[in-house]
Image: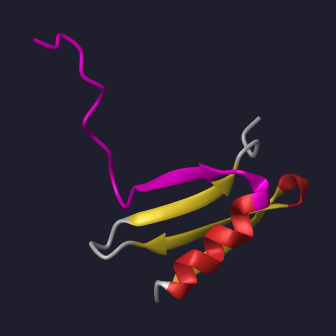
């Protein structure tokens, strides 16, 4: 049996981020839009990087970020 599990708690609206190659960022954005999913926000970050947020069909908040953004 497992003796360790990661924490199962949080408060407020949480989200999950997917990291993609910087050269694939625009392709993923296009793919999401072509599926009829609305991008609810695109954020500008340091180093001329961007990420975008959308909700999946179950209402979960998801984000796509370019790899290296947090290096």
Total residue callouts: 0
Seen from this angle, which residue lies furthest right?
Answer: 47
- 66 vs 2: above or below: below
Q: Residue at x 72, y 40 (%)?
A: 70
Quarter-of-image position of residue 48: bottom right
Determine whether, in the image, residue 17 is placed left or right of residue 59: right
Is residue 17 located in the magenta-colored stretch of the structure? Answer: yes
Give the x, y percent position of residue 11: 33, 51
- 38 vs 16: above or below: below
Query: In this view of the protein, can residue 59 be seen by the observer?
Result: yes
Extent of the magenta region: 1-23
Q: Residue at x 43, y 57 (%)?
A: 15
Determine whether, in the image, residue 22 is placed left or right of residue 38: right
The prevailing secondary structure element of the residues shown in magenta is: loop
Is residue 55 located in the magenta-colored stretch of the structure? Answer: no
Q: Residue at x 31, y 73 (%)?
A: 59
Query: In this view of the protein, can residue 43 be seen by the observer?
Result: no
Q: Residue at x 72, y 61 (%)?
A: 24
Quadrant of the image for the N terminus? top left
Seen from this angle, which residue lies furthest left?
Answer: 1
Nearest to the observer: residue 63 or residue 20: 20
Give the x, y percent position of residue 21: 72, 51
Determine whether, in the image, residue 2 is placed left or right of residue 35: left
Give the x, y percent position of residue 37: 46, 84
Give the x, y percent position of residue 32: 53, 77
Nearest to the observer: residue 40 or residue 38: 38
- The structure's colour scheme is secondary structure
Determine whether, in the image, residue 50 is placed left or right of residue 35: right
């Amino acid at each position: 049996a497992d003796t360790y599990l990661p924490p199962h708690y949080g408060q407020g609206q949480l989200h999950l981020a997917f990291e993609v190659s910087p050269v694939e960022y625009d392709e993923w954005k296009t793919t999401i839009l072509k599926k009829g999913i609305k991008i609810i926000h695109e954020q500008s970050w340091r180093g001329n990087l961007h990420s975008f947020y959308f909700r999946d069909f179950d209402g979960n908040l998801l984000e796509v970020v370019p790899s290296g953004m947090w290096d």
